[in-house]
Amino acid sequence: MVTWRGMRLEVSKSAYRELLQLAMSLEDVVEVLEYGHAFPGKKRKPEVHERCLDRKGGSIKVVVAESFQYSTKECVWIVVHVKKVGRF
């Protein structure tokens, strides 16, 4: 179980496909969330976090949203988007 800010990380279906294409794991997502900076661009809702981590001529962008999982009755982070920005 991977956590960030005390809540479990879950992955949406589209974000799972993006993680597979980038050969990334949830631990890599946590690294971007922990050490990345706020992504300049769109203004997001307060419960949505968009972080960016610079790497070798490009960046990795991760978007997570706070959600509630009814089956386990707990708050979780949903990874909704993972993307390469720039050249790699």
Image (spheres, grey):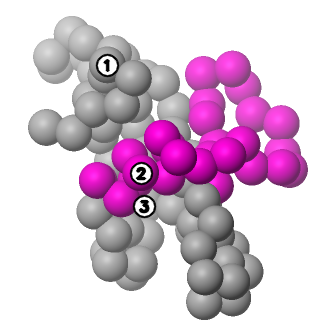
Instruction: Tell me which residue sits at (28%, 53%) in the image.
Output: 27
**Residue at mark 1:** 6
- Contact between marks 3 and 2 (CB within 8 A): the answer is no
Query: Is 76 placed left or right of 54 in the picture?
Result: left
Q: If you read the primary sequence from the N terminus, does the residue marked by circle 1 or circle 3 appear first?
A: 1
Alpha carbons under labels 3 and 2: distance apart: 20 Å
* Quarter assignment of residue 52: bottom right
Decide whether residue 40 is among the magenta residues: yes
Instruction: Tell me which residue sits at (36%, 59%) in the image.
Output: 28
Instruction: Tell me which residue sits at (27%, 32%) in the image.
Output: 3
Alpha carbons under labels 1 and 3: distance apart: 24 Å
Q: Which-is-in-front pick, marks 2 and 1?
A: 2
Query: Is 2 placed left or right of 49 in the picture?
Result: left
Q: Amino acid at mark 2?
A: Glu
Q: Amino acid at mark 3?
A: Ser
Query: Residue 8: horizontal and vertical position, in percent?
Result: 26, 29
Q: If you read the primary sequence from the N terminus, does the residue marked by circle 2 or circle 1 appear first?
A: 1
Q: Secondary structure at mark 1?
A: loop
| Of residues 62 and 52, the one drawn nearer to the viewer in this rendering | 52
Q: Is residue 80 something that shows in the picture?
A: no
Q: Is residue 48 something that shows in the picture?
A: yes
Q: Secondary structure at mark 2?
A: helix
Q: How many marks?
A: 3
**Residue at mark 3:** 14
The part of the chain drawn in magenta is 26-52
Q: Amino acid at mark 1?
A: Gly
Q: Which mark is residue 31?
A: 2
| Residue found at the very far bottom of the displayed protein | 88
- Contact between marks 2 and 1 (CB within 8 A): the answer is no
Q: Which-is-in-front pick, marks 3 and 2?
A: 2
